[in-house]
């Protein structure tokens, strides 16, 4: 006889006992120097917002493989590392992860260290020392990218070896090991043995953004969910979130280890002809820098919602993303609606959760009327449903 009560209890325990989906949030150390409403530090971060906070970035010393704190004044002079630890008082379940690398660190030094067994060991030992000293829960490696930007073909194998050595060293202390990887099909195919990578780490943060930007000579959204009918070549049709995630899955990445990267910013262009505002319209350069991020071609959502309200808003229902236009300025970005579509896509693929870059460009002060962190709150709400 079937015991329906026992089945019901088992189902209830399974549902109630499920681990919450990952919401990995990047804290960027340099934002403490931004002016006005753009200034961001740990005091702005609610302890219950994210499941993981990744502190970005620390660097790598090429000559001996050791970890280096890139801004000791921010980290220790302003006590931001201590302030991060204090978040656990309010939320003991919060995981703190230190992230090494990033675009500005380049690729060559990582290629050099990963190729040398002694330097790899020094790197692992140095990271362990940092995690112990500052009481972090794990380590995230953002090497952009193996076998690219001056790296070597051997990087692909050496990267896996390095991760396996980290995994072995972390096991006794149960430290988290994660990586940040390219969401572009061509780039991912160049840099990674995906199945082996998936076996070596706990989480894979797929940077499913920056598909287009002022590094090209035409207009394109930085993170479309789907392809456009205007995409003509195979490469163009692959530069979107769906193609990137499905490529990782097709090559053997465990879905439960993948976190879909979602931006809280946008990328913009100066149009060559203000009358031509379509995708692939010619452009003459990046959009004008915002007052907080202060980088031509990149604009925070907080800047857009606070200061760009007089721009004309457009929704691309094919790519499921918005953009705004004023005069010769064209900016593609993510808002609450596009974030919703992306989180729902991640859930439909059975992914482990999402990663967001970054805390400081969401409307963290709640200036625009939708509360603090409106984009990340949408992520959190949908992941928990």
Image (cartoon, grey):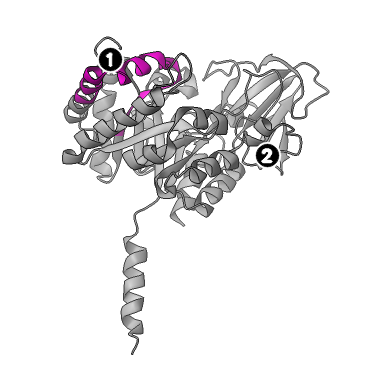
Which residue is pictured at 58% across the width and 19% down the height?
290
Residue 34 visible within the image: yes
Please give left or right for residue 62 compared with residue 30 in the image: left
**What kind of secondary structure does the magenta stretch mostly adopt?**
helix
Answer few, some or many: residues within 10 Å of disc 1's Cα (few below 14, many 20 plus, some between 14 and 19): few
Q: Secondary structure at mark 2?
A: loop
Q: Position of residue 231 (x, y in %)?
A: 73, 34
Figure check: 89 above or below 7: above
Q: Which residue is mark 1?
A: 72
Quick one: quadrant of the N terminus?
A: bottom left
In the image, the segment drawn in magenta is 97-125
Q: Are marks 1 and 2 in contact (CB under 8 Å)?
A: no
Q: Position of residue 191 (x, y in %)?
A: 46, 28
State the image quarter where residue 169 is shown.
top left
Q: Which mark is residue 227?
A: 2
Name the residue nearer the viewer: 47 or 151.
Answer: 151
Q: Nearer the viewer, residue 12 or 33?
A: 12
The residue located at (30%, 33%) in the rendering is: 97
Residue 46 showing in the rendered view = no
Callout 2: few (<14), some (14-19), or many (20+) C-alpha neighbours within 10 Å? some
């Amino acid at each position: 006889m079937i015991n329906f009560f026992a089945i019901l209890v088992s189902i209830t325990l399974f549902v109630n006992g499920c681990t919450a989906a990952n919401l990995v949030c990047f804290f960027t150390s340099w934002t403490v120097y931004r002016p006005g409403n753009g200034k961001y530090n740990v005091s702005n971060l609610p302890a219950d917002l994210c499941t993981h906070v990744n502190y970005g970035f620390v660097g790598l010393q090429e000559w001996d493989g050791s970890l280096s704190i890139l801004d000791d004044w921010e980290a220790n002079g302003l006590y931001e590392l201590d302030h991060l630890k204090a978040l656990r008082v309010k939320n003991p379940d919060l995981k703190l992860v230190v992230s090494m690398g990033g675009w500005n660190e380049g690729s060559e030094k990582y290629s050099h260290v990963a190729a040398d067994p002694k330097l790899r060991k020094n790197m692992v030992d140095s990271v362990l020392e940092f995690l112990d000293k500052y009481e972090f829960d794990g380590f995230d490696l953002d090497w952009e990218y193996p076998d690219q930007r001056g790296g070597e073909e051997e990087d692909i194998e050496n990267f896996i070896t390095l991760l396996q050595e980290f995994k072995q060293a972390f096991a006794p202390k149960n430290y988290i090991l994660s990586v940040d990887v390219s969401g572009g099909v061509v780039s991912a195919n160049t840099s990674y043995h995906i199945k082996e990578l998936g076996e070596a780490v706990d989480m894979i943060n797929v940077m499913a953004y920056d598909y287009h930007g002022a590094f090209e000579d035409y207009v394109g959204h930085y993170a479309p969910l789907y392809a456009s009918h205007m995409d003509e070549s195979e490469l163009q049709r692959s530069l979107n979130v769906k193609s990137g995630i499905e490529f990782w899955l097709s090559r053997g990445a465990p879905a439960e280890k993948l976190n879909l990267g979602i931006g809280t910013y946008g990328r913009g262009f100066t149009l060559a002809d203000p009358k031509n505002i379509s995708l692939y319209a010619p452009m003459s350069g990046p959009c004008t820098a915002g007052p907080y991020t202060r980088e031509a071609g990149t604009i925070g959502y907080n800047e857009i919602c606070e200061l760009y309200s007089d721009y004309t808003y457009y929704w691309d229902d094919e790519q499921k993303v918005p953009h705004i236009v004023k005069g010769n300025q064209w900016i593609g970005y993510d808002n609450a609606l596009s974030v919703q579509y992306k989180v729902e896509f991640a859930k439909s693929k059975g992914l482990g959760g999402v990663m967001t870059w970054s805390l400081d460009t969401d409307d963290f002060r709640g200036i625009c009327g939708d509360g603090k962190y409106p984009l990340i709150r949408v992520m959190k709400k949908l992941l928990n449903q």
